[in-house]
Amino acid sequence: MEDQNQTFKPWLAIWIAPRRTIRKILEVDSAKQVMILAMLAGLARQLENTTAQNMWDALPVPLILAERIVLAPLIGLIAVNIAGALLRWTGGWLGGKASFEQVRTAFAWSCVPTIFIVPLWILKLLIFGEELFTITTPKIYATLI
């Protein structure tokens, strides 16, 4: 049982009890922090996609980062809204009763583990620098041995 005097901390609780945390979030305020979560999730996913693509050899790193930092939050907002709509629509076929806002909120909060990639990604950037964006990666290969 949760102590009534204890402050609810969804950013921590989502890791331990995701279902209970989502239910509590939906009871309190279903729209709170959804936009922030969506934008951070978009940033995390786009940063990871950037390093996976290996097609950035011709562009300077500051330009790559600027492009991702500007566009990624917008992509995250669009993705969370589309995912919420599709999950609500298909969930309705299976008898689901949640509203679009509730489904979108649950989906956005499910992205919290993805969001925690951002600090790790910054650490990777500090260690490996431009190699994260190129095909040739001698530093990265050297650390694997």
Image (cartoon, rainbow, N blue to C red):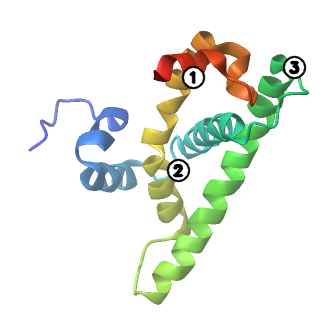
* Spatial CA span between label 2 and label 3: 38 Å
Which marked residue is nearer to the observer: mark 2 or mark 3?
Answer: 3
* Residue located farthest toward the top when viewing the structure as drawn: 126
Q: In this view, does 138 lie to the left or right of 110?
A: right
Q: How crowded is mark 2: few (under 14 residues within 10 Å), some or many (20 or more)?
A: some
Residue 18's place in the image compared with 86, above or below, is above
Residue 21, label in figure: none
Q: Is residue 124 visible?
A: no
Residue 85 position within the rendered picture, expressed as x and y whole percent measured from the top left: 61, 70
Task: Say what amino acid the circle numbered 1 marks.
Answer: Tyr
Q: How crowded is mark 1: few (under 14 residues within 10 Å), some or many (20 or more)?
A: few
Give the quadrant of the N terminus.
top left
Q: In this view, does 60 lie to the left or right of 44?
A: right
Q: How crowded is mark 3: few (under 14 residues within 10 Å), some or many (20 or more)?
A: few
Q: Mark 3 points at which residue?
A: 60
Q: Which of marks 2 and 3 is nearer the N terminus?
A: 2
Q: Name the residue under label 2.
A: 31
Task: Say what amino acid the circle numbered 3 marks.
Answer: Pro
* Spatial CA span between label 1 and label 2: 44 Å
Q: Mark 1 points at which residue?
A: 141
Task: Say what amino acid the circle numbered 2 marks.
Answer: Ala
Q: Determine the secondary structure under disc 2.
A: loop
Residue 5 position within the rendered picture, expressed as x and y whole percent measured from the top left: 17, 30
Q: In this view, does 134 lie to the left or right of 109?
A: right
Q: Earlier in the sequence, mark 3 or mark 1?
A: 3
* Spatial CA span between label 3 and label 1: 22 Å
* Residue located farthest toward the front when viewing the structure as drawn: 145
Residue drawn at x 50%, y 17% as measured from the top left:
143
Pick whichever, 24 or 145, lies toward us: 145
Residue 4 position within the rendered picture, expressed as x and y whole percent measured from the top left: 15, 37
